[in-house]
Image (spheres, helix red, strand yellow):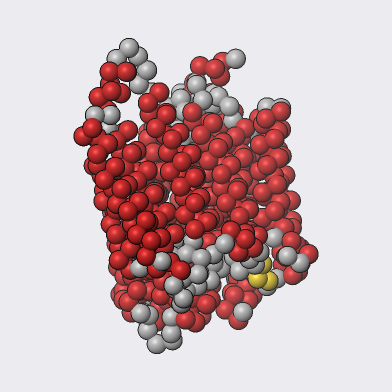
């Protein structure tokens, strides 16, 4: 490997080294605050190495990884999300009993796996990155051992994730069987230009199954509500953002490189999944009285919206996917951040009743939660609106009228349950809230407050002045397709 | 050659099916070992003797023996010996033995008939060739796999620890 290869790999190397550092720290000197600070520093340094790595991009580092601006953009997104999760976890774990230091090492391992997925250009890197992410997540989900629900969620995720990996591997094997190579680009060249041989098509369908599980798309979504509910709130935020974002990054790169949509069957399969995800997500969210489950179903629906942009496959499509995902990252982190901050030792703030008259108890938190929900619903001035607008623009450009109509209809259904939460938060008025309730409400630490404020800031910035991000995304997308 | 593959693959499929349907964990593990051996034979037939060897040493050997030990140790108590004697009735080991004997017979036939050494057949990959590939183009893969073991280890430690000892 040349020195430039190491420069290109810097963000991954820094993350890997921080995880080892955290492990060693935990072995010799257990100190929750210190470990959390080291983790945050490691992630920040990794973020600062992104421009350095961009200096040598695009670069194929061994057949396994391709470090281009596209991979680095997603790596930045993943690192920033992990940083937010780290800070939220510190506040959350302070309230919990037991050893806390391993949590941060596992978080860093999972981040490394996610960044590998974003840069993967080979089935081996794809699978290893995915497993690194998944194995860390099994433990992170079940991390709070004093409660039985996280353990249940962890087991569910373990079994279903293992099954989906089996599908994925079989799909890869079939494609390898036909093409004799595991590199994404060469798979495309060998599979012929006209149509996929049936082996490759079956392989792609099986890969789509594995990916669909990770993205919690209907009909592979069964795990999502239980795992979202059972996992500690910061981990839920991680599962909802980093784990899904990395998978979308990989799917987008893979499908663009092999020009997957020359197969109409694959297109229709994905369109079916998108429609099912939108409807099942939104309709089932209507029935929920639990905020974490509600957000789980809402994220299923959001991934359905994302697939609509994915299916548009025009020049706007890749841009729309990346922008939508960025907005989704900011919003979801903010929403679960509020849930995490409101959680008390031993009981999470997940029932709708926990949010009753929150406006009168903790106006700032309620305000942050409200704008996050409005952004999820796609109300103007928020990032969610621009994201949805982008998706619809991409769909219109490719004349996907049916999908667009379904998307708009679903947004209306979505509006109902998001507004219901806001109404509950505003309920009762000031007089009915006793001062004792306000005194009992958990205090928001400076670090948590800063994260939530930063996320709200990003949300408005993307909603009011998205031009800089759009320009950035356009440059990176040109880099990916032109290469 | 194709016939040899299908025979070994059949043994693998049958024994894996029996792993799933066995009610007793120890019996299931016996079939799982046979399944690994069958997969090793498949690797061997297609010119990967090094991987076949690793499959036997690591999976069928180390990991499975560890599993059997753990499962047996979990049943401590005065009735354990009686129970373990019950596990190893002839009916229980006849199934895995027949499947293993099939594999041995197949291997002996392959060696005896000389099919493996035919010109134009599959050339076996030596450990040296495997290492050169692993530490060349797949270097990052090897490093990632080693990183993959760490969360597994940390997770097993965290989830397997006794909760009571935390008070100290």
In the picture, the quarter occupied by the N terminus of chain A is bottom right
* Picture coordinates of residue A441, whole percent (x, y): 52, 27
The quarter of the displayed image where residue A31 is located: top right
Which sits in the foreground, A337 or A114?
Answer: A114
Q: Residue furthest front?
A: B112
Q: Residue furthest left?
A: B91
A359 on left or right of A37 = left
* Picture coordinates of residue A414, whole percent (x, y): 35, 56
Q: Residue at x 69, y 60 (%)?
A: A9
Which sits in the foreground, A137 or A355?
Answer: A137
In the picture, the quarter occupied by the C terminus of chain A is bottom right
Q: Residue at x 62, y 40 (%)?
A: A105
The quarter of the displayed image where residue A305 is located: bottom left
Q: Residue furthest top?
A: B78
Q: Residue furthest bottom?
A: A194
From where the camera sits, is residue A453 visible?
Answer: no
* Picture coordinates of residue A18, whole percent (x, y): 69, 44
Q: Residue at x 37, y 56 (%)?
A: B108
């Amino acid at each position: 490997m040349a020195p430039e290869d190491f420069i290109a790999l810097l963000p991954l190397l820094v993350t890997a080294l921080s995880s080892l550092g955290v492990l060693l720290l935990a072995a010799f000197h257990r100190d929750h605050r210190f470990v959390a600070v080291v983790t945050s520093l490691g992630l920040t340094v990794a973020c600062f190495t992104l421009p350095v790595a961009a200096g040598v991009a695009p670069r194929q580092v061994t057949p396994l990884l391709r470090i281009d601006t596209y991979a680095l953009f997603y790596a930045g997104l993943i690192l920033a999300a992990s940083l937010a999760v780290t800070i939220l976890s510190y506040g959350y774990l302070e309230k919990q009993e037991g050893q806390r230091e391993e949590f941060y090492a596992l978080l860093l391992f999972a981040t490394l796996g996610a960044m590998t997925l974003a840069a993967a250009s080979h089935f081996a890197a794809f699978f290893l990155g995915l497993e690194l992410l998944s194995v860390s997540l099994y433990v992170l989900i079940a991390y709070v051992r004093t409660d039985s629900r996280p353990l249940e969620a962890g087991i569910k995720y373990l079994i279903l994730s293992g099954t989906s990996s089996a599908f994925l591997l079989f799909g890869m094997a079939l494609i390898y069987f036909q093409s004799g190579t595991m590199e994404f680009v060469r798979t495309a060249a060998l599979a012929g230009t006209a149509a996929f041989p049936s082996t490759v098509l079956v392989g792609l369908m099986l890969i789509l199954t594995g990916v669909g599980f990770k993205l919690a798309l209907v009909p592979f979504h069964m795990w999502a509500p239980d795992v979202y509910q059972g996992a500690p709130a910061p981990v839920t935020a991680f599962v909802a953002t980093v784990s899904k974002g990395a998978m979308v990054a990989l799917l987008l790169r893979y499908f663009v490189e092999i020009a997957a949509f020359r197969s109409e069957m694959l297109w229709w399969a994905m369109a079916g999944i998108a429609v099912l995800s939108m409807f099942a997500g939104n309709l089932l969210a209507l029935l929920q009285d639990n905020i974490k489950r509600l957000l789980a179903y809402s994220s299923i629906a959001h991934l359905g919206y994302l697939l609509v942009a994915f299916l548009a496959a025009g020049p706007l499509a890749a841009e729309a996917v990346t922008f939508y995902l960025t907005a989704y990252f900011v919003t979801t982190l903010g929403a679960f951040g509020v849930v995490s901050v409101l959680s008390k030792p031993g009981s999470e703030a997940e029932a709708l009743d926990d949010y009753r008259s929150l406006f009168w108890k903790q106006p700032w938190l309620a305000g942050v939660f409200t704008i996050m929900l409005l952004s999820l619903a796609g109300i103007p001035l928020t990032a969610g609106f621009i994201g949805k607008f982008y998706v619809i623009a991409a769909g219109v450009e490719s004349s996907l009228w049916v999908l667009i109509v379904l998307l708009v209809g679903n947004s209306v259904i979505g509006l109902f349950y998001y507004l219901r939460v806001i109404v509950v938060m505003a309920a009762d008025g000031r007089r009915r809230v006793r001062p004792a309730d306000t005194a009992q409400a958990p205090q928001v630490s400076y670090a948590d407050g800063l994260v939530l404020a930063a996320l709200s800031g990003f949300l408005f910035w993307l909603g009011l002045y998205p031009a800089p991000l759009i320009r950035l995304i356009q440059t990176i997308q040109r880099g990916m397709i032109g290469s | 050659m194709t016939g040899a593959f299908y025979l070994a693959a059949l043994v693998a499929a049958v024994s894996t099916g029996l792993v799933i349907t066995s009610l007793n964990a120890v019996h299931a593990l016996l079939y799982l070992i046979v399944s690994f051996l069958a997969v090793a034979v498949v690797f061997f037939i297609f010119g990967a003797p090094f991987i076949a060897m690793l499959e036997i040493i690591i999976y069928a050997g180390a990991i499975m023996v560890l599993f059997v030990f753990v499962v047996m140790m979990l049943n401590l108590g005065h009735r354990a010996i009686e129970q373990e004697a019950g596990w190893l009735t002839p009916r229980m080991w006849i199934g895995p033995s027949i499947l293993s004997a099939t594999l041995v017979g197949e291997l002996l036939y392959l060696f005896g008939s000389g099919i493996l050494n035919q010109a134009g057949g599959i050339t076996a990959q030596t450990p040296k060739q495997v290492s050169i590939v692993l530490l060349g183009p797949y270097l990052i893969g090897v490093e990632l796999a080693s990183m993959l073991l760490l969360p597994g280890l940390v997770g097993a430690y965290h989830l397997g620890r006794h909760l009571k000892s935390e008070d100290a």
